[in-house]
Amino acid sequence: MRYFSHYSLSFVLSVYNPRWGRRVCRVAKKKGRLEFLEMKKNGELVTWITAYDYPTAMFAETAGMDMILVGDSLGMIVLGYSGTIPVTMDDCIRHCQAVRRGAPNTFIMGDMPFGSYQISDEDAVKNAIRFFKEAEVDSVKLEGGVRVESRIKAIADAGVLVCGHIGLTPQSSGPMGGFKAQGLTPESARYVIEDALAVERAGAYAVLLEGIPPELTEFITKRLSIPVYSIGAGLPCDGQLIICGDMLGQFQAFTPKFVKKYANIAEITTKAFKDYIDDVRNKRFPGEEHVYRIRKGCEAEYAAMLKEYEKL
Ligand code: KIV
């Protein structure tokens, strides 16, 4: 085994995964920083989605997704908080581990939760390294531009790939007065541009733009040499991110303007649960096909044994 590189080892494990008890063939080649740079040069768009659990990660990899973000949006999408602030490092690590198990051949990014990089550069590096060592992510992401420039630099200098996240930054939704689009005026756009330049200068390998107008997205994408991705920032960039709970119609509290719904899981799941309740109450489940039958040939002996116990 020591002759395999990290990537070929994960490829072999994904094909011969002992936990699945049989051979499965998942042969997608994992993309990394260099492939994403190449895609930017060739005008090929990166597809990116959030996932927080093993099955969703597995479906994303099977579908051919380029990247998965284990966002701190997990606080709202799967843990039921009203925002992302309560999410902890331990929450993020646990969910990144599940996603890594589900998508061994996909580039995975761990989202640094609020409190994991605000205190100091050292703290930021320590937490970024936790993602790397404990959850085998390929990179981390943190929110902010100019104000976190030294954090991004410290993490990148420690050898951890880091992605910036600017524009609408959910962890600052309190001070911003809610989940509000940014860069809508020249003055506000100037801040976003300064943040984008700071992120690149600090050594990030990519930047995510959230909730800004497409004109500003296009300007930043042309101005930066690193890949620029969008969530709610329009088409003219190097790839798109969407939150799985939004696009699948799982998250019910609200739907941001930039979300396209591709399914209605809430409706499908609720209907399945109602059908199950109805079947149980009306004795339609379990059916003949769902029960185990007494081994052929020992029915009489079985009945006699039960009779014996009736007498006790
Ligand atoms: O946590 C998350 O899913 C994110 C997206 C909103 C970009 O950071």
Image (tube, rainbow, N blue to C red):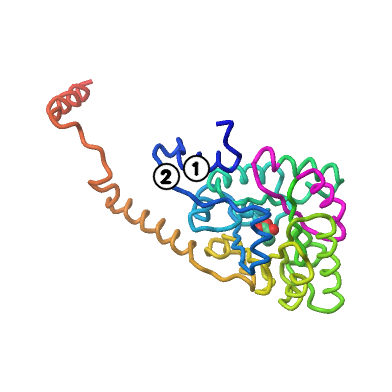
Residue 267 is one of the magenta-drawn residues: no
Q: Residue at 61% of width from left, 40% of height from top?
A: 6
Residue farthest front in this picture: 3
Q: Earlier in the sequence, mark 2 or mark 1?
A: 1
Q: Residue 115 location, x and y as percent?
A: 79, 48
Q: CA distance from mark 2 to mark 1?
A: 7 Å
Q: Is residue 219 left or right of residue 280?
A: right
Is the residue marked 2 within 8 Å of ligand 1, measured from its CB?
no
The residue segment tinted magenta is 131-159
Figure quarter occupied by ligand 1: bottom right
Residue corresponding to mark 2: 24
Labels in figure, total:
2
Residue corresponding to mark 1: 14
Q: Is residue 125 left or right of residue 93?
A: right
Q: Quadrant of residue 221?
A: bottom right
Q: Quadrant of residue 90?
A: top right
Q: Residue 175 location, x and y as percent?
A: 82, 63
Q: Are marks 2 and 1 in contact (CB under 8 Å)?
A: yes
Quarter of the image where the N terminus is located: top right
Q: Residue at 76% of width from left, 58% of height from top?
A: 164
Q: Is residue 168 visible?
A: yes
Q: Residue 285 location, x and y as percent?
A: 29, 50
Name the residue nearer the viewer: 93 or 78. Answer: 93
In the depicted structure, whether residue 298 falls above or below residue 136: above
Q: Residue at 72% of width from left, 67% of height from top?
A: 210
Q: Is residue 82 visible?
A: no
Quarter of the image where the C terminus is located: top left
Amino acid marked by disc 1: Ser
Amino acid marked by disc 2: Val
